Amino acid sequence: MKSQVLVYVIVISLLLSITLFAGNEIMKGNSQVQSQIDSIAIKLSKYEIGKIEILQIPPRIETRTRITPEMLEKSFDYKLTISDARGGVYGDKLAELLKTLVVQPRSEMADIRWGIIFYDMNDSRAGAIYFDRWGRNGAVGDVPVSFKGDLFKWLDGNCSRCFR
């Protein structure tokens, strides 16, 4: 009887340890992705982001496979370049919207249709955010995430007219 109880205690302890470890890894991943977004927002606020590229493959275009961030960057249909985001209305507004953006890790990549790529003053890549056609899911860099916030609403509202 005592040995059965001991076995149960050990099994339960192992299961709890595994669950806590997995939960910590998810939170760690979430905080790293959120930190990337926060870093871009800070750089925009400090006028350290020079160029911003906005890419799109229209949602009406059907594909056989899911579009990844890499595919979007190679095969975009539309590209809008803000050559100097420092102090302009776009840079300031994007910084404000990025500060309110909240991400949660996802297990699989969404069908990417929009991308925002940020470059520092030396034209080095500072980060990238990608969205599906609805703006609810996407990626930060190559990490699949879901989004909460108004960044996509602003992006769609301001850039869709340029891409018709």
Image: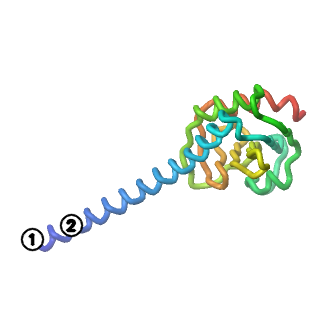
- Residue nearest the observer in this picture, 118 or 73: 118
Q: Amino acid at mark 2?
A: Tyr
> Residue 73: x, y in percent?
81, 52
Q: Amino acid at mark 1?
A: Lys
Question: Residue 2: which disc?
Answer: 1
Residue 79, quarter of picture: top right
What crowding class fits label 2: few (fewer than 14 Cα within 10 Å), some (14-19), or many (20 or more)? few
| Left or right: 119 in relation to 110 | right
| Left or right: 78 in relation to 128 | right
The quarter of the picture where the C terminus appears is: top right
Circle 1 sits in a helix, a strand or a loop, which is it?
helix
Say which residue label 2 marks: 8
Residue 46, quarter of picture: top right
Q: Is residue 154 above or below residue 108?
A: above
- Residue nearest the observer in this picture, 161 or 111: 161
CB under 8 Å between discs 2 and 1: no
